[in-house]
Amino acid sequence: MSKEDVFVGAIDQGTSSSRFIIYDKSARPITSHQVEFTQFYPQAGWVEHDPMEILESVKVCVAKAVDKATADGFNVDKGLKAIGITNQRETTLVWSKSTGAPLHNAIVWMDVRTTSICRRLEKELSGGKGHFVDSCGLPISTYFSATKLLWLMENVDAVKEGIKKKDALFGTVDTWLIWNLTGGKDGGFHVTDVSNASRTMLMNLKTLDWDPATLKTLGIPGEILPKIVSNAEVIGNVATGWPIKGVQISGCLGDQHAAMLGQVCRKGEAKSTYGTGAFILLNTGDKVIKSNHGLLSTIAYKLGSKAQTNYALEGSVAIAGAAVQWLRDNLGIISSASDIEAMASQVENTGGVYFVPAFNGLFAPWWRDDARGIVIGITRYTTKAHIARAVLESMCFQVKDVVDSMQKDYGNDKKDGVLRVDGGATINNLLMQTQADLSAMPVIRPSDIETTARGAAFAAGLAAGIWKEDFIFDTAEQMKKATTFRPIMTEEVRKKKVECWNKAVNRSFDLADLSFEL
């Protein structure tokens, strides 16, 4: 078999779509296929996915991508040696071990139905909101899987019954996919990886195992939880019924951790991924750093069962690209997401308009689930172009706030720092220049902006022996085709804009009780 006949695949299961990308041995993407799936909003603040629709979307993506590659002359059927999985994190599922059927729709990471559970835990537990921080690095929040699992255990009869009969399995989306890919009810492997497990609020960051004290406190039975593995090791083989039967699954990372690997972030380096939300991670090496500025301590990656664990500080922004979708789908200001750059470029500034996209509250560094979205500074002068530009600026302000917090916690000097960026929104040059201006630091965009899938492929190829770490971390080669955006805004203008943004953010607080009724 020639070198050209070795391929690695990556399943990239996101918040609104699934993709399958195939890479050749030089880590060049040769083909891909993407399928969107349905978002369900049963109530205000609730967001769900159909687990079976997610499975079907992945199956279609894999089949279509393999067909495309074959049509282009690539011998993928024989040459595909490994696949990696990357996924939306925190999204929570419970299903039947005996039938394979979901016991409820998946509760998505941005869903806030567990607010009352969080408030109850904060009151009952001696450590309040930070009761579990020393163990898992995370505050009690609607964001993480544990509170979503508690809601299912308390409110869904099928889940209660399944746990009682020892027939229920819990998992995030990676676990659901791997279990089904490797056989489902006929012997599927019930596993998750350290990065996804680190986002449940249930894993101890030091032991990399489920924390017994946390499980006892929350009343979560350990037998429903998956086994935790590293990000790069052979998990199992794809079972009959899938287009790539027999191929080994040898890599798994949560989407933001995969992007960090795809961006080859070493200790002290940070990346920001712009998708539905925005997620900024800083690799802190082999040390867990506790944040004093609203960030989370988490896993960066662990590339093998015996490899050193890299940790990270993370700041998560709930609404980034989703605000652009809102302009398109709810307000009709633009007809497609790609239109926003041209519209925002019609004006030189926002005309004093500031937009805070706190649709379901604010994540890092504020952690205010009582915040709601606002637009302020509107006058008769305001046009839809000003609002479009304010939406783009809101994404950049939120990322800037997280980067500032990281520098305070980690001690990086902004003068020497850069921000690596990726994700679909980064094709927007105005967004990237605005990010550089407001952050006062260079922004580096790689030639391949889909680094999430690339990171999953790297992990799988590493475990399968196709690539070595030296190849993966060859940053000099990766930087050859990167685009750098350098700040051009004056410090005086930047300072004034940041003051106005902070005023707008504070105005968004304590609005959750606004009535829907007339």
Image (spheres, grey):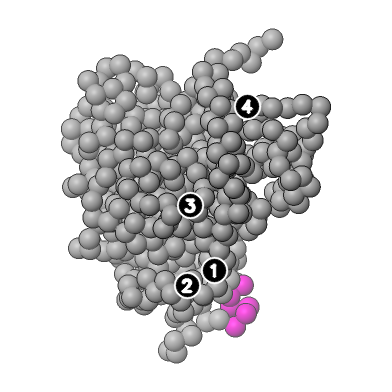
- Place residue 503 in its image quadrant: top right
Residue at x 44% of width, y 86% of height:
3
Asked whether, in this view, residue 40 is left or right of residue 249, the answer is: right
Q: Which mark is residue 478?
A: 2
Q: Nearer the viewer, residue 283 or 24?
A: 283
Q: Range of the magenta residues?
A: 68-73
Earlier sequence position, callout 3 versus callout 2: 3
Q: Is residue 372 magenta?
A: no
Mark 2 residue element: helix
Pointer 4 residue? 374
Which residue position is annotated with label 3? 272
Question: Closer to the N terminus: mark 1 or mark 3?
Answer: 3
Q: Residues within 10 Å of mark 2 (few under 14, many from 20)?
A: some
The residue shown at (42%, 71%) is 475
Q: Are marks 4 and 1 in contact (CB under 8 Å)?
A: no
Q: Residue at x 77, y 37 (%)?
A: 384
3D distance between C-alphas at marks 4 and 2: 40 Å
Disc 3 residue type? Answer: Ser
10 Å neighbourhood of mark 4: few (<14), some, or many (≥20)?
A: some
Gap in angstroms between the C-alphas marked 1 and 2? 7 Å
Q: Position of residue 125 (x, y in %)?
A: 25, 21
In the image, what residue type sits under mark 2? Gln
